[in-house]
Every structure is written in structure tokens, then in C-alpha cells.
């Protein structure tokens, strides 16, 4: 029984720790959207979450690390299974089905992550630490889109002469926060219209390999 109690206590502690982390990341997101990166402080987030600044620093080395966590949480999308995992599970053999899946996932994730990425890009001009973070996040995006381009190549969806790097650029364009801002935020497109545009664009760029 003692072993069971220790296991239960350990699981309870981990659950509480995860709840605290979730609150911290959620508060940081709200501050970023309301006050920008300049308004984000570890003591401020700690006070809002009812924890000590030391508790926040134990989880995140500083503002940049906390901001990265906000971006990573946003990229998970909605639901228990991360959007990236759901993307990886899409069958690559059918280009239209794959593009439709990517369109839906882009429309799910973009409202969560695009506003954060855009404000970071704007603020990075005046903050060297943030500029480094923005470059790292951009590198992460390119790496991910290159992986997706590799899936397209392996499934035979790249037109002759089209390189994986070119395909990576195409996928980066259709998943970019700038496109979301232009069409949805400023253009007031509905999310299903935006998803359809992304899907149709990807299909059109690569469908010539199927002809």
C-alpha cells in the first residue's frame, strides 16, 4: 500500500506541476497579446498566476524561453493530439487528401500562433534576444516544412525539376502568419475559406506531377 500511495502522490504532484505550467504559459500568452513582448515580465506573470517568480524561473529560463513555450503550445492546436502528430498521420499517397488535411490544420493553428509570431517579428527589430528567438522559430518552421516537402517528394508529388527547397518555400508561404493576417485578420475571410485557399494552393503547386 505504501508503494501505491507514493505512486499516487507522485502523480498528483506531476499533475499539479503541469497545471501550474499551463497557467503560466496561458498568462504569458495573454500578456503578449495585450501588452507585447515589452510588457512581458517574469514577476508579472508570477503574480497573476499566484506563484513565486522563482517558480516560473524553475520552468523557464527567462522571457524568451517563456515566449517560445507560448509558441509551441499554440502550435499544438486544439485537442489532446498535437496538430503536428495529426499532420504526420495524414496519408501522403493522395495529394488532395493531404492538402485538404494541411489546410484544415493550418486554419486550426494559425489563429493561435500567427498573432504571436507577427508581434515577435515586429519587436525583434529592437531586441537582440528576441531577434535570436525569432530566428530560431523561423528555422524551426523551415525544418518542419522541409520535412513535409520530403513527404511530398517520397510520394511522387513534386513536379519534375522542382527541388525540395522550392517545395519547402511553397509550404512556408501557405502556412505563413503573414498570409493569415492578410486574408483572415485584415480581409475578414472565414476560417473555412482560408483553409480551402491553403488546400487549393498546395494542390495546384504540386498537382502537375500527377498528370
Image (cartoon, rainbow, N blue to C red):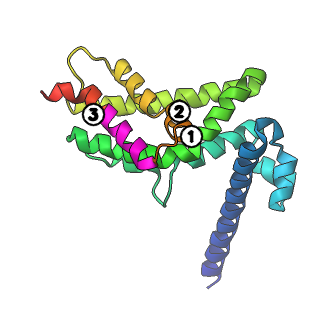
Residue 160 locus on image (x, y percent): 20, 17
Helix, strand or loop for disc 2 = helix
Which region is colored magenta? 191-201
Q: Is residue 107 left or right of residue 11?
A: left
Q: Residues within 10 Å of mark 3 (few under 14, many from 20)?
A: some
| Residue identifier under label 1 | 185
**Residue sitting at the far left:** 211
Q: Is residue 71 magenta?
A: no
Residue 150 locus on image (x, y percent): 32, 29
**Residue sitting at the far top:** 161
Residue 103 locus on image (x, y percent): 37, 43
Q: For this rendering, which residue is in front, 165 or 103?
A: 103
Who's the residue at 84% across and 62% down the image?
A: 50
On the question of residue 92 being in view, the answer is no
Where residue 203 is drawn, which disc sits there?
3
Q: Residues within 10 Å of mark 1 (few under 14, many from 20)?
A: some
Q: Earlier in the sequence, mark 2 or mark 3?
A: 2
User: For the residues marked 1 and 3, what is the alpha-carbon distance in whole angstroms?
Assistant: 24 Å
Mark 2–mark 3 CB contact (< 8 Å):
no
Where residue 182 is drawn, which disc sits there?
2
Q: Earlier in the sequence, mark 1 or mark 3?
A: 1
Mark 2–mark 1 CB contact (< 8 Å):
yes
Q: Main secondary structure of the magenta part?
A: helix
Who's the residue at 33% across and 21% down the image?
A: 164
User: For the residues marked 2 and 1, what is the alpha-carbon distance in whole angstroms?
Assistant: 6 Å
User: For the residues marked 2 and 3, what is the alpha-carbon distance in whole angstroms?
Assistant: 21 Å
Q: Nearer the viewer, mark 1 or mark 3?
A: 1
Q: For this rendering, which residue is in front, 1 or 14?
A: 14
Seen in the picture, residue 68 relative to 2 is either above or below; the reply is: above
Helix, strand or loop for disc 1 = helix
Q: Is residue 194 magenta?
A: yes
Who's the residue at 56% across and 40% down the image?
A: 185
Amino acid at each position: 500500500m505504501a508503494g501505491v500511495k507514493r505512486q499516487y502522490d507522485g502523480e498528483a504532484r506531476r499533475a499539479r506541476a503541469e497545471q501550474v505550467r499551463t497557467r503560466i504559459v496561458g498568462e504569458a500568452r495573454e500578456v503578449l497579446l495585450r501588452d507585447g513582448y515589452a510588457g512581458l515580465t517574469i514577476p508579472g506573470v508570477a503574480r497573476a498566476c499566484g506563484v513565486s517568480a522563482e517558480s516560473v524561473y524553475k520552468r523557464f529560463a527567462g522571457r524568451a524561453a517563456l515566449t517560445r513555450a507560448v509558441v509551441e503550445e499554440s502550435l499544438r492546436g486544439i485537442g489532446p493530439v498535437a496538430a503536428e502528430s495529426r499532420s504526420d498521420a495524414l496519408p501522403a499517397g493522395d495529394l488532395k487528401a493531404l492538402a485538404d488535411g494541411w489546410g484544415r490544420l493550418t486554419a486550426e493553428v494559425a489563429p493561435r500562433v500567427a498573432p504571436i509570431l507577427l508581434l515577435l517579428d515586429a519587436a525583434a527589430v529592437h531586441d537582440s534576444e528576441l531577434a535570436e528567438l525569432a530566428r530560431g522559430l523561423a528555422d524551426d518552421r523551415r525544418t518542419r516544412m522541409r520535412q513535409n516537402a520530403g513527404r511530398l517528394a517520397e510520394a511522387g508529388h513534386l513536379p519534375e525539376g522542382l527541388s525540395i527547397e522550392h517545395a519547402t518555400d511553397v509550404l512556408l508561404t501557405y502556412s505563413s502568419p503573414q498570409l493569415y493576417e492578410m486574408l483572415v485578420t485584415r480581409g475578414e475571410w472565414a476560417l473555412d475559406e482560408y483553409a480551402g485557399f491553403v488546400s487549393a494552393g498546395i494542390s495546384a503547386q504540386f498537382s502537375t506531377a500527377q498528370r
